[in-house]
C-alpha cells in the first residue's frame, strides 16, 4: 500500500480522535485536571507511569459520560456550547449513539485489566451515567447535583486506584477525601449552572439558579468560604496556607453574589474551578506532612456529629 493511500486513513484517525477530545474539552479544566490532581494527592502517586494510567482512565470514563449526555440534548449545546461535536456537525447523533454504547463495555474491560475493584468503580460510574442521562436524573436540581457529585466520586475512586501502587485498595485518608469531595461538589455544583441558565430553560431543566436565583447565589457566597475553613481545619493545613485558601474562597463566593451577568458567571466559574482544584490537593498535604499516616476520620466525624446533635437537641 502506498503512502498516498495511507495518508487519508491517518487523517481520518486524527479527525475522530479530535472529535473524541472535543466531547471532553470543556471538562478538562473542571474535571480531568482536578480529579487527576486528587488521585496523585490521595493515592499517593506510585510512579510517573501510574499518573498516565490514572489520567487516561479518568478521561475515558469522562468521555463515555459526556457522549451520553451530549446526544441527549444537542439543542442545548447550540445555545451554550456550539463548538461541541454534535452542534458543529462533526458527528451525527446516530453515530454518536453507537459510539456511546461502544464506550460502555470498553471502559469496563479496560478497568478489569487492573483489578476487580476498579471494574466495580467503572460499573458504578456507568450505572449512574444511565440514571443521569437515559433516566432523566438531570431534570431536577436535587438528583442532578447528587448524581453528578457521586459520579465525580467514582472518577476519583478509579483515578486513585490506578495512581497508587495497589489497584485493589484505597487508604482511609483517600476514602475520607473522596467522601468530602462528593459533599463539597454536591453543595457547590450549581455554581456551574448560572452561566448555562438560558440553555437549561430550553431543555426543561430545573436547576437551582433557575428556581432560586437569589438564594442559590447566597448559598455559594457563604458555602465556599465555610467549606474552605472546614477543609483547612480537617486536613491540619498551616496558618499561612489556610489564610490564603480561605481568602480565595471568600473572593470566589463574593464574585457569584456581586457579579451576575452571563460573562461574569463564566469568569466566576473559572475561579471556582481553580478553588475546587486546589481543594483536591489538601489530602496530599496531610500525606506529606503527616508521613502518610491514616487520618482519624471516624473519630473526627463522630465528634462533629455529636456536637451538632447536642446543639440541635
Image (cartoon, rainbow, N blue to C red):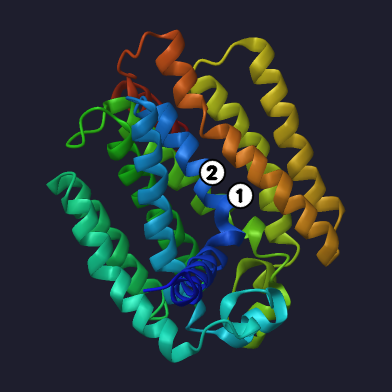
* In front of the other: 19 or 5: 5
Q: Is residue 149 above or below residue 167?
A: below
Residue 157 falls in image quadrant = top left
User: In the displayed structure, does residue 292 sit left or right of residue 280?
Assistant: left
User: In the displayed structure, does residue 127 sit left or right of residue 237?
Assistant: left
Residue 172 on image: x %, y %: 27, 27
* In front of the other: 70 or 131: 70
Q: Which mark is residue 29?
A: 1
Please give the name of the residue rendered at 36% of the width and 24% of the height, measured from the top-left corner: 44
Please give the name of the residue rendered at 40% of the width and 39% of the height, measured from the top-left corner: 52
The quadrant the N terminus occupies is: bottom left
Q: Which mark is residue 57?
A: none
Residue 26 on image: x %, y %: 61, 61
* In front of the other: 213 or 265: 265
Please rate how many residues cluster around mark 2, counting C-alpha atoms within 10 Å: few if below 14, some from 14 to 19, many from 20: some
Q: Secondary structure at mark 1?
A: helix
Q: Is residue 248 visible?
A: yes
Query: Separation of disc 1 and disc 2 at Cα?
Result: 6 Å
> Cβ–Cβ below 8 Å for labels 1 and 2?
yes
Q: Is residue 204 visible?
A: no
User: In the displayed structure, does residue 305 sit left or right of residue 11?
Assistant: left
Residue position for label 2: 33
Please give the name of the residue rendered at 34% of the width and 42% of the height, measured from the top-left corner: 53
Q: Secondary structure at mark 2?
A: helix
Residue 227 falls in image quadrant = top right
Q: Is residue 185 above or below residue 101?
A: above
Amino acid at each position: 500500500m502506498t503512502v498516498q493511500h495511507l495518508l487519508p486513513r491517518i487523517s481520518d484517525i486524527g479527525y475522530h480522535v479530535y472529535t473524541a477530545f472535543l466531547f471532553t474539552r470543556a471538562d478538562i479544566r473542571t474535571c480531568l485536571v482536578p480529579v487527576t490532581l486528587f488521585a496523585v494527592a490521595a493515592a499517593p502517586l506510585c510512579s510517573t507511569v501510574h499518573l498516565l494510567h490514572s489520567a487516561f482512565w479518568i478521561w475515558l470514563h469522562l468521555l463515555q459520560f459526556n457522549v451520553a449526555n451530549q446526544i441527549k440534548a444537542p439543542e442545548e449545546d447550540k445555545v451554550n456550547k456550539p463548538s461541541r461535536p454534535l452542534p458543529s456537525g462533526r458527528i451525527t447523533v446516530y453515530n454518536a449513539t453507537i459510539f456511546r454504547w461502544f464506550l460502555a463495555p470498553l471502559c469496563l474491560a479496560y478497568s478489569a485489566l487492573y483489578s476487580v475493584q476498579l471494574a466495580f468503580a467503572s460499573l458504578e460510574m456507568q450505572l449512574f451515567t444511565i440514571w443521569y442521562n437515559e433516566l432523566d436524573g438531570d431534570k431536577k436540581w436535587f438528583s442532578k447535583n447528587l448524581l453528578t457529585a457521586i459520579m465525580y466520586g467514582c472518577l476519583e475512586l478509579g483515578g486513585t486506584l490506578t495512581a497508587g501502587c495497589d489497584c485493589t485498595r484505597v487508604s482511609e485518608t483517600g476514602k475520607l477525601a473522596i467522601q468530602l469531595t462528593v459533599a463539597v461538589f454536591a453543595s457547590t455544583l450549581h455554581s456551574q449552572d448560572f452561566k448555562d441558565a438560558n440553555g437549561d430553560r430550553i431543555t426543561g431543566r430545573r436547576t437551582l439558579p433557575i428556581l432560586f436565583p437569589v438564594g442559590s447565589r447566597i448559598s455559594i457566597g457563604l458555602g465556599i468560604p465555610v467549606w474552605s475553613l472546614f477543609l483547612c481545619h480537617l486536613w491540619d493545613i498551616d496558618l499561612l496556607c489556610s489564610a490564603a485558601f480561605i481568602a480565595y474562597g471568600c473572593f470566589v463566593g463574593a464574585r457569584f453574589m456581586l457579579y451576575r451577568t452571563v460573562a461574569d458567571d463564566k469568569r466566576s466559574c473559572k475561579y471556582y474551578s481553580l478553588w475546587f482544584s486546589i481543594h483536591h490537593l489538601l489530602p496530599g498535604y496531610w500525606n506529606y506532612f503527616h508521613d502518610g499516616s491514616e487520618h482519624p476520620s471516624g473519630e473526627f466525624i463522630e465528634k462533629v456529629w455529636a456536637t451538632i446533635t447536642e446543639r440541635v437537641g
